[in-house]
Image: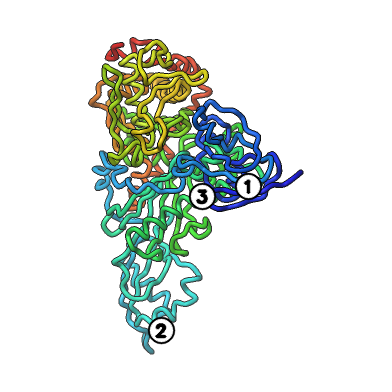
Amino acid sequence: MREFTVKFHPQGKSIRVTQGTDILSAATRAGIVVSAPCGGEGVCGKCRVIVDKGSVKTESSRLVDDADRKRGVVLACQTLVESDVEVTFTKESLEAHEHLCHEAEDFTKGVILKRENKFPLSPLISKVYLELTAPTADDGTSDLDRIMDALKGRVGALRLSTRLTNIKHLSEVLRESDFKITVVLAYREGAQEILSLEPGDTTGSNLAFAFDIGTTTVAGQLIDLKTGTILGTRIAFNAQAVYGADIITRMIYASEPGGMAKLNSGVVGNINEMIDDLIKANKVNLGDIYAIVAAGNMTMIHLILKIDPSGLRKAPYVSTVSAFPPVSAAELAIEINPRGIAAFLPGVSTYVGGDIVSGILACGVAENDDLTLLVDIGTNGEIVLGNREWMIGSAASAGPAFEGSGLTCGMKAVSGAMQRIIIDANLDVKFETISHVAPKGICGSGYIDLLSQMLKRGVMGKDGKINRDTASGRIRRVDNNYEFVLAFASETAIDRDIIIRDDDIDNLKRSKGAIYSAIISIINKVGKDITDVKKIYIAGGFGNYLNIENSIFIGLLPDVERSIYEFVGNSSLAGARMSLLSRDAFNATEGIHKNITYMDLAAEPGYMDEYIAALFFPHTEIGRFPSVRL
């Protein structure tokens, strides 16, 4: 087989590949992370490149319009190398992965922050300053025992332990510091472990990270453990997305040669990039970071730990582990203090992971007397119903649409994303973007507003098809698809129209149908009615805005009294932060994960009928949505 050179711009990187290799695969091998949420299936249209030189064989795609074709734009995943070639990535194919989101400081504000004082401040990492007496002829206590004795009065009845690495140079550290040292302690499995001994008093700086490891996005926060203050927040697309948008695709890829290493490297790279960025932004020392606490679905945590996830997708669908012991961060190549630890919140089952356990902790579902519902709208829509006595959980394969992925103009909830959208009687579009800058795309909350407005104004029918007979310059036919223009190229920051297509609506329709039908099915399973639920928490990566009224109007959420709804943002990240700041909170997750019964929707009689019925706006049974007038 012949080999050719592919050169990438603007990176300036080159790689040799065999004839017939697609450009996306070549870019991945060259270490270039490209936005490809569909995993190279050619259905998201994100991996756009311009062929500058050379010969390629490409598949025609409806996602590339005539104007772009004329300037040489193709989809990298659908374009095969036939000679030496040079290609240039378009801006949108790279920007989702090249930059962390810095406009995320309010990412989890809301009801969750009000609950954090429920647990006493007792962080997983603590620092204790000791001024020890030097040994004498009359006091021959060993150096280690001298430290242990001094700590006993400071850590209560918890068992103390340490590592050999701390003992090897203990004598030198004590004597050079005149027996004045700071002991760094980690709370691990009901005991305190000495992680490090630092000369002098270093108690003034005690920092750690909380992470939400999602299928589509990764979010992280730098936390001051002395005060509980959030020093900074970052969000980024999960770099694993280039290998597939959903967890099933990634499980399969993990079993291929080299697949596990690439998936692990992608998400660990996300974590390390955020750590580095936040440390530099806050001008703190890497050596002061002794822990991370992360919440995520079962597949993500298995991949971070390099545990084979194949059992999660094969009958009887059992995870290797559900409660993860704290491990050395260095062992995972997570770049904090080499003696630091990485802790992960426990999960429940294949599709109900530590992210939902974290959300339950943050919202207090397991402490309520009343029947409470938590709905986390993400790639794997997770739902828990219950109270302090019992909980039942399930997951719906919602896909990444409401996280802005897999759609023509979708993006995460960051600067430039349309998050509020109104269509007036003349079909003119008014919108608000995050950070109030020129629009770059549409995030999840924007799509919910958009669908609601299109339905109200007759731009879209109940079947989700754009109305072909509506007289408007914003509606046009492209190939066999119809699309509606929200903003023309001259109004945007990406120099092309921001649109929604019939195919986008189909994706969103399936996502909303999966969430709604799962909610109803889980309530039916326990013999309850939606009116029995007294509180509904809605979580997800929508930024700081979600219009509940519009969510009901399109049939995403049940039509019940609005006052029982509460949007709580990223509850997974909030719960991870709470667990980092309080041992009591961390221990509470163990009880939560053991108290949830898992319900497999796929095996549930009637679920598929519920799902099919939900594939209209708002629903085929309009009586379920009495407040919706069309």
Relative placement, left or right, of 331 versus 57 is left
Q: Is residue 297 above or below residue 453?
A: below
Q: How far across and down, in percent of the image, does residue 362 sit?
A: 32, 41
| Residue matched to label 2 | 140
Which quarter shows the C terminus?
A: top left
Question: Which label is found at residue 6?
Answer: 1
- Label 2 crowding class (10 Å Cα cut-off): few <14, some 14-19, many 20+? few
The type of residue carrying mark 1 is Val
The type of residue carrying mark 3 is Pro
Q: CA distance from mark 1 to mark 2?
A: 70 Å
Q: How far across and down, in percent of the image, does residue 342 sit?
A: 45, 55
The type of residue carrying mark 2 is Gly
Using the rendered view, name the quadrant where residue 361 is placed. top left
Relative placement, left or right, of 379 versus 43 is left
| Circle 2: element type | loop
Q: How far across and down, in percent of the image, does residue 380 sit?
A: 46, 33
Q: Residue at x 52, y 55 (%)?
A: 332
